Amino acid sequence: MMLQQEISKRELPPLLSMNDGNTCTADLWRERRAEIIDSLQQHIYGCTPEPPKKVIGEIVEQGDKKAFAGKVNQQRIDIKFETPNGEFLFPLYLFLPRNNPCAPLFLHIVFRPDIPDKYCPIEEITDNGFALALIYYKDIVNDNLNGDYSDGLGKLYIGKRQRHPDEWGKIGMWAYAASRALDYILTRDEIDHKHIAVLGHSRLGKTALWCAAQDERFFMAISNNSGIGGAAIAKHSTGERISDFIRVGSWDWFCERFKAYTGYEDSSMPYDQHFLLAAIAPRYLYVGSAESDGGADPKSEFLSCVAASQAYKLLGYQGLVTPDEYPIADTNLHQGQIGYHMRTGYHYLSRYDWLQYMEFMRKKINDE
């Protein structure tokens, strides 16, 4: 099979081998999943603190009732919880369609403080009967690069000191906040608690995957153009390398130990990104790629979905259902537990991407 040959060339660490060398069975999957999460914490994302005992959400602002033609109830909510070094607060923006009293929801981690973010067609999403929650990533911790942990969760957990080798980075902090947003969302009756997806683009696609891998309350994880450190296999990739993250200072998205694999992506890493995707099994997963997004390496994103499908098959599910070939532009693969599409164009979260994510989520809800 062509795709299996392509995966073999990547020389990936075995997904279904236990740390003691035994083969993972369906009965051992929970144990193997815990090993995978531990490996990802130790080598790339850092260790996530325990969740707070209590999360409080306070509605502080009601949006314009005439916005979105009066079809949407919009609110700003302050999310509060205690950390070991004091209270932390960040805003959550909630958009509830008036045409659906118990709506499935996309939790979108966004790049811009302008709400709605330019990557997010709110009216089209809510017209389709979905609710939407937005959190702005810099409200959690800055993205100033070069080890700046001077605000937000960074200040409360790290500040000016040197991080430990396996201490979390900013992707971990953004993911942690998304789970705290979910804590609150699950208290709202207007939302279908069983059908909540976490979604992000680029580095925030990496974040969405890491969030859902750890937090099994999410129905689905959606990664858009997330690339290396996200959906894309790192070994023998043609996209970004660890040295690229270090060169621009973005290594602080990850843990300190991650830097040790600079130049060794093709040899000594004990994990690869198919581990991350597999940790979401058997829940739903969607990876969106763009044909001309060389940095994200769409072939490596696609092969990662194929490789992660081993875990789904072990558990009795279909992973990615695909012909035995690389996809071309405008290919949409929606049959299995793993969804995938390849579109034309560049590194962007587009309307086309959103339409595919809504179609896939609607199909999987209706299939239940």
Image (spheres, rainbow, N blue to C red):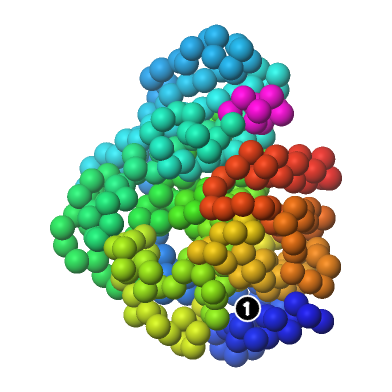
In the rendered image, the quadrant that contains the C terminus is top right
Residue 259: tell me if it is visible.
yes
Q: Which residue is mark 1?
A: 15
Determine the residue positioned at 82% across, 55% down. 335
Segment colored magenta: 122-130
Question: Toward the viewer: 307 or 280?
Answer: 307
Secondary structure at numbered mark 1: loop
On the image, which quarter does residue 312 sit in?
Answer: bottom right
User: Which percent across, then down, holds residue 268?
Assistant: 46, 87
Up the image or down, 71 lies above or below 352; here it is above
Determine the residue positioned at 37% across, 66% down. 245
Q: Total of numbered circles in the picture?
A: 1
Question: Toward the viewer: 321 or 311?
Answer: 321
The amino acid pointed to by label 1 is Leu
Determine the residue positioned at 38% across, 20% down. 60
User: Which percent across, then down, holds residue 206?
Assistant: 50, 57
Up the image or down, 208 lies above or below 299; here it is above
Up the image or down, 13 lies above or below 59; here it is below
Q: Is residue 128 magenta?
A: yes
Residue 49: tell me if it is visible.
no
